[in-house]
Structures are given as structure tokens and as C-alpha cells.
Image (cartoon, rainbow, N blue to C red):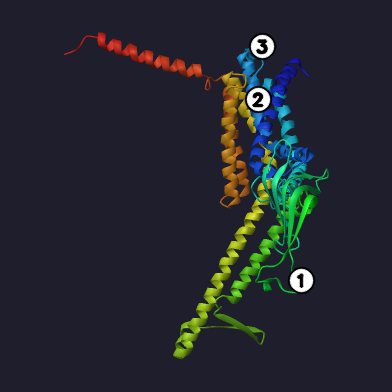
Amino acid sequence: MKTLHRFILKSYIGPLVMTFFITMFVLLMQFLWKYIDDLVGKGLSWNVIAELLLYASAGLLPMALPLATLLASLMTMGNLGENNELLAMKSAGISLPRILTPLIVLTIFISVGAFFFSNNVLPYTNLKISTLLYSVKQQKPELIIKEGVFTNLIEGYSIKVGDKDPNTGLMRRILIYDHSKDEENTTVTYADSGYMKPTADQKFLVATLYSGNSYKEVRDNRKPRYSYKEKLPAQKQTFEKEVIIFELKGFELQRADESFFKDSYQTQNIAQLEKTEDSLSKAFNTQIESFSQHVIRSSIFRNPYWGRRQNDAKVTRSLNVDSLYNTLPPVEKISALERAMEFARSTKSYVSSSKDEFFYKQKYIARHMIEWHRKFTLAFACFVFFFIGAPLGAIIRKGGLGTPVVISVLFFIIYYIINITGEKFARELYWNPFMGMWISSFILLPLGIFLSYKATTDSVIMNADFYIEKVKKLFSFSTTRKKHTELSPKTE
């Protein structure tokens, strides 16, 4: 490898790694902000949170890598231009395409790696994070006894605490309603003070109560519950200390079965998507054919021709519907019209319901094709963004994180808006999946080619000083012309 190529790669890899982790951090914070309500207060262990962040990071990598490529290429070429190193290379007779050759090769490897990651690793991480997020959402919130509020998280019990000492954990005026036996609130316990602490394995809650009473209604189990119209006698027990153990059900993380999410299009690779799409398309075409035959058989539109074989010759006769209708008596005419209207309403209802079902199935097939194209577009986006960032950095000649970050975010927002719009149109079947997923690349790729041409020809299209000088010359020309007009002699 030539010294120049090593220098270019060394200048590029550092910003690429730095911007990649910065981008991943920003996107990960956005992910946490989106699911913060499902995570907070669930008492999740650190290993579950770490596992969730790991899968989320893998899912965000295809989005972070193109942005990191754009920002790193812009910073690298901007730094080289700002330090006049790019000018020195060009003065030595080295063209810009030759300077960018090692970076182009590296970008190709990154794009290919991004494709294999999207095809092989991303379906697995999508399956894992879908299962884990579903399990976390189904988990009960962490058991927290609040002051002055009934807590119903423990199955079969309602607990209320008057106040709680934050330093010692001592609770006062504890009220416990027991309806675990599905007999309404037949047992009530009141204590002056006490402690409630879960066991080490988080399976039980131990309540130690002091100076209290327990009340229990006496019922005859042989009588139905609704037969009690009068007040029932109650048993009262006084205690100085009592220990009640509650079983905590549903507070530990119960992982869902991954088989429920395996059929999702987001958890399939290219081969699986093609196989699923082919099966869905065949089933859809079969259903369309069945629908057509059903409409023909049951529709009010009847075939006015019929044929029968007679001496191996087909005889065809025609019917004049109006003539037949006119031959009917008035009562039968009304009956025929009513039956025709009934057939029409039935056919209309069937067509309307089938139309909605066909539209849903077409959208479901389109989702698989969208995911199929996504595995290519995300990898190709790295290539497109490199050919936008590298020549743009060579033109503006500004390094650091200031100007490159602003320009990179601007281009990425444009790309993201176009991509989301195209994907939405494809999902709603306004566009085909190919057009919807590739339109953003097709729009930005010519821009990258144009910027590459301008950078190769040393264009000043993005140089602010060029436009400032043009404005100064324009004002200077206007001022000179005005003075010349004032000094010139007036003609009669």
C-alpha cells in the first residue's frame, strides 16, 4: 500500500469510528425515549436492559452507518482541504479520483458488509428485540406501595398505607383487604404500623404488622352469595405482631415464545422473503380466481346464451330478457324484481368485503417486498452518501464538527424524508415497492455525481467567498455606474 493511501485511510478511519458511535448514541437515546414508558417501573435487571440495548443497537446500525459515512467523508476531505494538504496533493499531479481510491474501496467493503449484516444478522436481532419488548410490555410494574392510595398489584389483595417513613421504611395505618378467595372483601386487616419487604428472590412479599386487628365476616358456604341481605356477624382478632406472606405473581420477566414472531417479514432474510412472497402471491391469485368464478355464478348478470350438444353439434340459442319479462304476470314481475334486487345487494356486499380483504393482502405482500428492497437500499446508501460527503468536503474545505455536522444532518434529513415518503406510498400501494424504496437513492445519486464532477474540476460552487466577491463586484459596479452618470454632462 502506498504511503498516500495509508495517510488517506488513517485520516478517514478515525472520524468514521467517532461519528459512528456518536450517531449510534443519538439514535439509541431516541429509542429509549420512544419506549421509556414501557421500561420504567418494571424492576428490570441490568442484564435484561443490557440485552435490550444490544439488540436495539444492532437494529439501528443500518441507519447509523450511512450517516457516519457521510459525516466522516465530509470531515476528512474538509480537514485535508482546510490544512492545504489536498491542494499539495493536487499540485503534485495527483487527481481527486486517485486520492479517493482507497476510500472508495473501503466504502465498497462497508456497503457489502452492511448488506450481509442486514440479511443475516438483522433478522435475528429483530426477532430477539420483538420478543423481548413484548415480554417487557406484558410484565407487571414494579411493586411500589404509595401513601394514601390502594395498591392492587398483588393478586387477590388491596393494600393502603397512610404514610411511610422514607428513611426507616416504617409504614403507619396499614389497611389490607383480602379477596383472594373470590368472596368480596370478607377479611380486613388493620395495623397501626409495620414493614413490607420482598424476599431476595422477589417471589414473596413479607408484611410484618404491629398493634392491629383482623376482621372476618362469618358466612354459610351452603347459601348463595346473593342471599345475604342483612349484616353478617364478624370475627375480630387482636394482635401485637402478625406476619403475612403474599405471593408475588407476574413480577418476574416471563419471556414470550419466539415462534410467535418468526413469521414477521422483519425477521426473515432474502431467501425467506422471496419464498414467503411467492407463497402469498400464489394464494392471492387463487383467491382472485375463486372470487371471479363465484361472482359469475352468483351474480345477477346471467349468461343469455346456453348450448347443448345434439348429434355432436353444438346448438346455441339466445334469450331476450325483456321479452321474457313482459310475458310474466304482474305479481311475478314484482317477485322477479325483488329477487333481482336481493341478488344485487348480496353481490355488492360480497364484492365490497372481498375488495377490503384483497387490499389488505396486497399490502401484506408489499411489506415483504419492501423489506426485501430495504436490505439493498441501506447498503447502497453508504455508497451514495460517501460520494456526496467526500466531494462536498473537498469543495467547502471546512473540517471539524461544525459545518460538516450541519451539512450532514441536512442531507440525511432530506434522504430520510424522501425514503419515509416513498416507503409509505409503497405500503399504501400507490407506488410499487421498487420505486418507493429506491427513489431516495435515485434522487441523491445524481447529486453525488454532480458534486464529484465539480470537486474534480475545482469548482467554487460551495465556496462562500466566491459569492461574497460576486456581490461586492456587483455593488461596486452599480456604484461606479451611478457616479459616472452623475458626472456626465446633461444633453438637451
Label 3's element? loop
Q: CA distance from mark 1 to mark 2?
A: 80 Å
Q: Quadrant of residue 51?
A: top right
Amino acid type, mark 2 = Ser
| First in sequence: mark 3 vs mark 2 | 2
Residue linked to disc 3: 92
Label 1's element? loop
Q: CA distance from mark 3 to mark 1?
A: 102 Å
Q: Is residue 339 left or right of residue 176?
A: left
Q: Quadrant of residue 309?
A: bottom right
Residue 268 in view here: no
Residue linked to disc 1: 221
| First in sequence: mark 3 vs mark 1 | 3
Q: Label 3 neighbourhood size at 10 Å, few (<14), some (14-19), many (20+)? A: few
Residue 429 in view here: yes
As drawn, 236 above or below 24: below
Q: Label 2 neighbourhood size at 10 Å, few (<14), some (14-19), many (20+)? A: many
Q: Position of residue 8 (x, y in %)?
A: 71, 19
Q: Nearer the viewer, mark 3 or mark 2?
A: 2
Amino acid type, mark 3 = Ala
Q: Position of residue 242 (x, y in %)?
A: 80, 50
Q: Is residue 166 left or right of residue 410?
A: right
Q: Are marks 3 and 2 in contact (CB under 8 Å)?
A: no
As drawn, 24 above or below 2: below
Residue linked to disc 2: 73
Please report the residue visible at 58 percent of the width from the left and 66 percent of the height from the top. 353
Residue 66, which numbered label? none
